[in-house]
Image: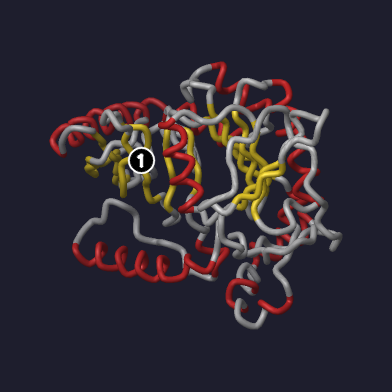
Amino acid sequence: MEIPQHWVRVEGFSPHLGRSGAPLTVWGWSAESDADAERVGRERLAELLERVAREGRLPETRGYYPRTPLREPVLEEVRADDGRLIGVVTRNRMGCEVLCTDLLLIADVDCPELADERPAARRRSTQSTAGDRGRGVGGFLRRLVLGRPDPTPMEPSGEDAAGLDGPEPVAGPAGSASSSSGASGYEAYPDPPGEEGRVVTATGPGGPSVADCLAAENAWEFGRRHPGLGVRVYRTAAGLRVVVTGAGLAPQSPEARALLMELESDPLYVELCATHASYRARLTPKPFRIGQAALTVPWPCRDDAEERRYLRWVDTYEAAVGEYAVCRLVSASGPVPGPDEQRLVELHDERTGVAERLPLA
């Protein structure tokens, strides 16, 4: 994992931008010290000035997935019994808490058919702020071009997107259940005689919905093709999250990329994992899904005033997130995770509210 905590802004000026030149600012980073971060920043600035002089313009932006390390504060370290670092929790630029690890293979799968679901009518009066967000130009274009409503928190229920009743326990991927009922709130359905390998472990009284099962079929097929791996399928507000245990693959490896693509993971997410040598799982809701104003203060803060604004936003956000979950478990199969993997899985499930029947956001 590459998440340096020392960041320094370095400023310069290029006479080759526009008619009279323009200032430039770059970031330097280091895992060691601010001084080392400044050195990196000055080297990057010199390279940028040389490129601008040569090409007469700034290089194209690289969007949300930069080739530089992630500029996120580390909130918590997760360590094995022997002290090895196996994961960290950071706060991303949206303000969400994120689990970063190179131990658990985590796939992010977008499912537009699941994102179509809307919150129950009885929550509209109490969630009007969240439900009315995105009504401007961006929301209009999303509805016009994509032909579907803005994403909103989803009410937990036993129905799927079409209003069908949730099914009885269904056939999951091959392998034995990796979780049993207990503190995590999971309900395990054992194999019927003569039908070993047909196991679903799910949250809630009704199990997964029809829509969940249809979306999870590719992940279940993945489990059948890889019986030596543990496969945990979660429902999220806009799709699925698949956590794979037992793979032991570095995020930047070709083998990891192949498995992520086999799970139909978002291509940009796959690039992010390889670039930063880390799998990622969001632990707390996206602000816009819970009616929270966007975080506009970048980290690290420039001064005390920015830091106060940053901390006020975090306080407001954290006061709201307890009413929502990020995931609910659809199924779990395969071998039991190792102790280090289990520690990360338990942290993930606790922080994302897997055992809580709350709207997904």
Please name the residue shown 52% across and 57% down the image.
353
The quarter in which the C terminus is drawn is bottom right
Residue 203 x/y as whole percent = 64, 53
Position of 313 with respect to 126 (left or right) is: left
Whole-percent x, y for residue 325 in the image: 55, 59
- Which image quarter: residue 357? bottom right
Q: Residue at x 31, y 36 (%)?
A: 79
Question: Above or below — where is 126 with respect to 78?
Answer: below
Q: How is the image coloured?
A: secondary structure
The amino acid on which the numbered mark 1 sits, given as a three-letter code, is Val
Q: Residue furthest left?
A: 35
**Residue 338, position in %: x, y?**
46, 28
Mark 1, residues whose alpha carbon is within 10 Å: few (<14), some, or many (≥20)? many
Task: Judge from the rendering whether residue 242 lies leftward or rightward of residue 11; answer left or right.
Answer: right
Q: Which residue is mark 1?
A: 88
Figure quadrant of residue 57:
top left
Q: Foreground residue, 277 or 47?
A: 277
Q: Quick one: 299 or 193, which is closer to the camera?
A: 193
Specify whether residue 52 is in view: yes
Residue, x 66% and y 52% (percent of image)? Answer: 238
